[in-house]
Image (cartoon, helix red, strand yellow):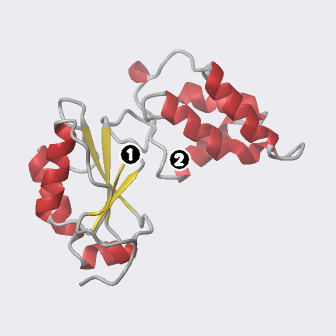
Amino acid sequence: MSRRRPAPKELQPESFAFTEDNLKQALSHIAKYPEGRQASAVLALLDLAQRQHNNWVPMTAVDYVANLLKMPAIRVFEVVTFYTMFNLAPVGKYHIQLCGTTPCWLRGAEKIKETCKKKLKINLGETTDDGKFTLSEVECLGACANAPMVQINDDFFEDLTEESMIKLIDDLSNNKKTKLGSQTGRVSSEPYM
């Protein structure tokens, strides 16, 4: 199942509404924009919806956000389908997003991708049987100096090797604390030695 297309009808919830806390946050985001420009809060509201709904945006949330912002649902749908940070179908507990653009590719992203596929026994766009991991390839994540890298949920893991990627997957599988950022100890984007 593609996370870039809406999930099948049987997976879609019948309704969606923000929790009380998320509604307060949503209204706070909307209030940042002048009258007539509240649609500018669409990204923030979609992010809230995705976080509330187990890391994916159901179609009922698209409609809910559209109603809240007083904009056509198709406009919200255009946004949610344009930005790859939004998932339109369920993803695993850990969504591994592999950067496959030139800097990461030159530094070994293909090996990292093959390591993930072999270790997890899934292909790109698939989720492990236990629902723990989803594997996706995405465009540049903006950490080119620390290539190759992946984003897992909200966290960056940089300067990866096949071995460090396997350790990362093992640590996540076993609910162990993971080391964020550079896996070699490099600080920020200082020169690689």
Type of the residue with mark 2: Thr
Task: Check disc 1 and report its element: helix, strand or loop.
Answer: loop
Q: For the view shown, which residue lies furthest in the top direction? A: 14
Please indicate whether residue 179 sits to the left or right of residue 59 in the image. Answer: left
Q: Is residue 8 found left or right of 75 in the rendered image?
A: left
Quarter holding the C terminus is bottom left
Residue in front for this viewpoint, 160 or 132: 160
Left or right placement of residue 151 versus residue 67 in this view: left
Residue 72 is situated, as x and y percent measured from the top left of the image, at 73, 36
Where is residue 185? Give x, y as percent. Answer: 26, 68
The residue depicted at 37 percent of the width and 77 percent of the height is 145
Give the mark nearer the N terminus: 1 vs 2.
2
Q: Is residue 103 above or below residue 112?
A: below
Residue 51 locus on image (x, y percent)? 49, 34
Identify the image quadrant of residue 49: top right
Tell me which residue sits at (56%, 16%) in the image.
15
Q: Residue at x 76, y 44 (%)?
A: 39
List x then y, in percent, for residue 58.
Answer: 50, 29
- Checking the image for residue 62, the label placed there is none
Q: Which mark is residue 81?
A: 2
Q: Where 129 sits versus 135, above or below?
A: above
The vertical placement of 142 against 42, above or below, is below
Is residue 36 visible from the viewing direction of this image?
Answer: yes
**The disc labelled 1 sits on which kind of residue?**
Asn
Q: Which residue is mark 1?
A: 153
Does residue 122 show up? Answer: no
Q: Secondary structure at mark 2?
A: helix
CB under 8 Å between discs 1 and 2: no
Is residue 81 or residue 35 the one in the foreground? 35
Residue at horizontal 39 percent and vertical 76 percent from the top: 189
